[in-house]
Image: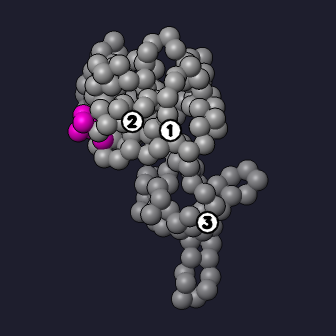
Amino acid sequence: MLKLSENPPVTFPEGKSVRDFEGKWWVAHTKARNEKALAWDLMGKGISYFLPLVSKASKTPKGRVIRSLVPLFSSYLFFCGDETARVETLRTHRVANIIPCTSVEHFVNELWSIEKAIESGADLKPYNFIEIGQKCRVIAGPLMGTEGIVVRTSKETRLILQIDMLGQATSVDIEADLLELI
């Protein structure tokens, strides 16, 4: 585990905003747990990137609390450059796939919002982006392992549990961060 000071910067070049980057935007879908290593590699190649990192506290088996910086979006790093930058990123062998950005202005505005939240010291936490009607599985808590379809009312997320053979269903309130897509 890295010390906080040993992590790559959130943006490179440091001191620049994602709105200042020049070139085409790409999303690197990294191999598992390669986000920070890819950031260091891109830094060494002079390729502009944005890797949103957030603080996470975890306990050791002996009860000691350890703080670390983890990627806000697991397995993703955003970079900006030309075709050469894309090829150089692939040459790191840390990337599973590269996704080109099509709606650049909208995408940069979304990244800028996250960048500003990080700069302000906001307590960001990953949040499952689950759309209404998607089939999900509960990953923690007393309902762990149950599957259903997500619906939202005006105030909460609900999981519909069905018995298809009977044509009957019930629903339960649930926190979205306890769900994963199936």
> Of callouts 1 and 2, which one flags the residue occurring earlier in the amino acid sequence?
2
Q: Residues within 10 Å of mark 2 (few under 14, many from 20)?
A: few
- Residue at image x 51%, y 24%? 22
- Which image quadrant is residue 58 in? top left
Return the x and y of residue 139 as percentages of the image width and height.
43, 54
> According to the image, label 1 marks what residue?
126
Label 2, label 3: how far apart the Cα atoms are: 38 Å
Q: Is residue 44 left or right of residue 127?
A: left
Label 1, label 3: how far apart the Cα atoms are: 21 Å
Q: What secondary structure is the magenta-colored segment mainly?
A: loop
> According to the image, label 3 marks what residue?
133
Q: Is residue 84 left or right of residue 132?
A: left
Numbered label attached to residue 83: 2
Image position of 16 with respect to 65: above or below: above
Q: Which residue is nearer to you in this view: 135 or 62?
A: 135
- Residue at image x 50%, y 62%? 136
Q: Is residue 153 left or right of residue 95?
A: right
Q: Amino acid at mark 2?
A: Glu
- Residue at image x 49%, y 35%? 25
- Which image quadrant is residue 39 in? top left
Query: Helix or strand or loop: what does disc 3 sit on?
Result: loop
Q: Which residues are magenta?
A: 91-95
Image position of 177 with respect to 4: above or below: below
The nearer-to-camera label among 1 and 2 is 2
**Placement of the N terminus among the 4 image quadrants:** top left
Return the x and y of residue 142 as percentages of the image width and height.
46, 56
